[in-house]
């Protein structure tokens, strides 16, 4: 079996397996929910895998960037809804405009935070994994406390734009609306990352840098500039993931990023460090299996992701698309 | 410094961790020549190359390229002055294609680089044949050709080539010697090489390095004729 055929075979097998135990209409509903969850996890994991792959940095503050993204989006939603009524409006255009405004604000703030984190916190500890873990965990605590100071310590309800609420009934299959939006956003983000990596000079240098940062420098490229860029892009994706997850779960809370970070790390390891395509496939595996198992055996839902990770690492220690760096 | 020296090292000391590897390396590389750096395993040849290109920072001493100090500067700045580096073990990107390996090295305009790439691909026809194949699938000799070609994509005035013949079959080494002969018409070359026959075929000058110090220098012909020196420092 070829290198690419094995992960695809695993994916298709896992996708169809639950049909043996679940009624087809419920299966389709769960599949859409699983794909949406997978795409949301992918938004977080894609940044994490690029940061680890290129910079060899274990960024535990990625979860805090996720939380900040959720809260910035929450503020934009509240403000624009109070002032202009864009969330409560039945207009699809105004609802979409609200989402786009929140995405822009979230990603801008996350990029700024990412640049500050990379320059001040991460740069002094390049190449020192233990210090990276400690200092980024410290940054997480500070960033979450700042959220508690700014927005309060309690869970808050995220207003969901009117057009994204409820569901469609398609041939007796219940299709929730926002998960479809999440799937589209995730697919667009994957296409954008894949385009940049495959078709642009920056992408070429980043791919080469994932393999050998030292050699990239010896070819005349300032790797640190790319480190900052990739860290900022990863932060933006984490922020976007936070916003989308907040709408998906209809709530925000300061520690929400930490919970998603566990899924994101599982996905990065399953997909192979540094591989964005691996992260997409890993995220979809995690999202789908979580939903199927949560329906069949609710108590085993989180455990199944660990089981998948262990199984894949036993078969391919470098992950589905890992280069064995 | 000799008037025609392109690269000069003056009492360079480099540490790797706690280990004092270079303990006083001094060299002056003449323009438009091939200089070979010889020495036993562990003498400090690769460390010298990595120090010149900035991958290791010298603790003491000076390195000048065309009269300008370059020690302490980051590698990407040093390389952009006109220095190409072919590391030991090739350093090619195995997940990229041959074409992408060449493109990632381009620092000038696409038109300039394309013209040079055309010359290189004529010199290394295998690279043209496997242009869209992943570099990781090439043979050892083809990987070495790619690594050398990549250092030549830009109009570099100095090429640092570290052990290009390592692990290659004799027939491939012959091809490599021909290619390097063609390249020496366009750039000054500093070569680290364990294969004495290859060094003899290419080099104009030599430096001998032992325990991190330069211990002997001169025209290559004088080393070829000095059996005692070869026996003492190279064991041949």
Image (cartoon, rainbow, N blue to C red):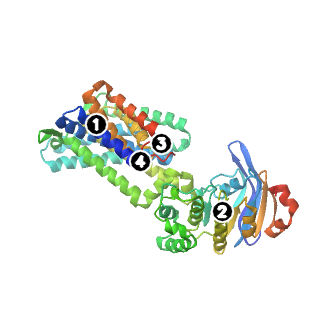
Q: Left or right: where does residue B59 sit relative to residue A3?
A: right
Protein chain holding label 2: B
Specify the subunit that label 1 lies on. Answer: A
Does mark 3 fall on the same chain as mark 2? no
Label 2 or label 3, whichever lies nearer to me, is 3
Q: Nearer the viewer, mark 4 or mark 2?
A: 4
User: Quick check: marks 3 and 4 in contact, CB under 8 Å?
Assistant: no
Residue A279 image-quadrant placement: top left
- Measured in 3D between alpha carbons, the distance from the residue under mark 4 to the one under mark 1, in whole angstroms, is 21 Å
Is residue B124 left or right of B200 when viewed as pictured? left
Q: Please report contact status of discs 1 and 2: CB closer than 8 Å, yes or no.
A: no
Q: CA distance from mark 3 to mark 1?
A: 25 Å
Secondary structure found at label 3: loop
Return the mark for residue B205.
Answer: none
| Mark 3, residue position | A318
Q: Which residue was labeled with disc 4?
A: A1
Element under disc 1: helix
* Dots 3 and 1 on the same chain: yes
Tag in front: 1 or 2:
1
Residue under the point 22% across and 44% down: A180
Mark 3 or mark 4, earlier in chain: 4
Dot 4 and dot 1 within a common chain: yes
Q: Residues within 10 Å of mark 1 (few under 14, many from 20)?
A: few
Q: Please tell me in which quadrant of the rendered image residue A145 appears.
A: top left
């Amino acid at each position: 079996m070829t290198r690419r055929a094995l992960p695809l075979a695993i994916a298709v097998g896992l996708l169809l397996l639950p049909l043996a135990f679940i009624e087809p209409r419920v299966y389709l509903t769960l599949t859409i929910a699983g794909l949406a969850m997978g795409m949301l996890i992918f938004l977080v994991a894609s940044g994490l895998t690029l940061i680890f792959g290129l910079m060899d940095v274990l960024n535990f503050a990625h979860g805090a960037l996720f939380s900040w993204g959720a809260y910035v989006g929450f503020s934009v939603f509240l403000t624009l809804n109070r002032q202009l009524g864009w969330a409560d409006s039945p207009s699809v255009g105004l609802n979409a405009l609200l989402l786009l405004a929140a995405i822009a604000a979230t990603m801008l703030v996350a990029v700024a935070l990412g640049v500050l984190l990379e320059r001040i916190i991460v740069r002094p500890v390049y190449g020192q994994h233990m210090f990276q873990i400690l200092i980024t965990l410290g940054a997480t605590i500070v960033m979450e406390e700042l959220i508690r100071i700014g927005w309060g310590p309690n869970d808050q309800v995220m207003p969901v734009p009117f057009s994204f609420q409820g569901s469609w009934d398609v041939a007796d299959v219940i299709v929730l609306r926002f998960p479809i939006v999440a799937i589209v956003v995730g697919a667009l983000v994957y296409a954008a990352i894949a385009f940049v990596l495959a078709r642009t000079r920056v992408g070429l240098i980043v791919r080469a840098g994932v393999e050998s940062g030292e050699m990239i420098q010896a070819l005349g490229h300032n790797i640190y500039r790319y480190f900052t860029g990739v860290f900022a892009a990863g932060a933006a994706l984490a922020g976007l993931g936070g916003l989308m997850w907040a709408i998906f779960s209809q709530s925000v809370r300061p520690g929400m990023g930490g919970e998603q970070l566990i899924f994101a790390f599982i996905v990065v390891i399953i997909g192979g460090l540094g591989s964005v395509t691996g992260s997409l496939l890993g995220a979809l595996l995690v999202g789908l299996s979580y939903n199927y198992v949560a329906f069949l055996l609710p108590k085993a839902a989180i455990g199944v992701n660990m089981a998948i990770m262990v199984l894949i690492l036993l078969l391919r220690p470098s992950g589905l698309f890992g280069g064995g760096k | 410094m000799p008037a025609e020296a392109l690269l000069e090292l003056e009492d360079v000391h480099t540490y790797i961790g706690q280990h004092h590897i270079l303990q006083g390396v001094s060299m002056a590389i003449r323009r438009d020549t091939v200089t070979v750096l010889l020495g036993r395993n562990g003498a400090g040849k690769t460390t010298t190359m990595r120090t010149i290109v900035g991958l290791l920072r010298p603790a003491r001493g000076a390195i000048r390229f065309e009269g300008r100090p370059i020690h302490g500067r980051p590698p990407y700045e040093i390389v952009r002055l006109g220095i190409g580096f072919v590391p030991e073990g090739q350093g090619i990107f195995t997940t990229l294609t041959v074409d992408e390996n060449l493109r990632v090295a381009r620092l000038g305009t696409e038109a300039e680089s394309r013209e040079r790439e055309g010359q290189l691909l004529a010199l290394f026809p295998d690279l043209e044949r496997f242009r869209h194949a992943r570099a990781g699938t090439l043979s050892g000799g083809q990987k070495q050709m790619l690594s050398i070609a990549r250092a030549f994509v830009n109009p570099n005035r100095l090429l640092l080539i570290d052990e290009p013949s390592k692990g290659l079959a004799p027939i491939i080494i012959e091809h490599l010697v021909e290619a390097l002969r063609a390249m020496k018409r366009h750039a000054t070359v500093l070569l680290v090489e364990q294969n004495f026959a290859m060094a003899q075929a290419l080099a104009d000058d030599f430096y001998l390095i032992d325990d991190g110090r330069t211990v002997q220098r001169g025209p290559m012909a004088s080393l070829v004729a000095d059996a005692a020196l070869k026996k003492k420092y190279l064991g041949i």
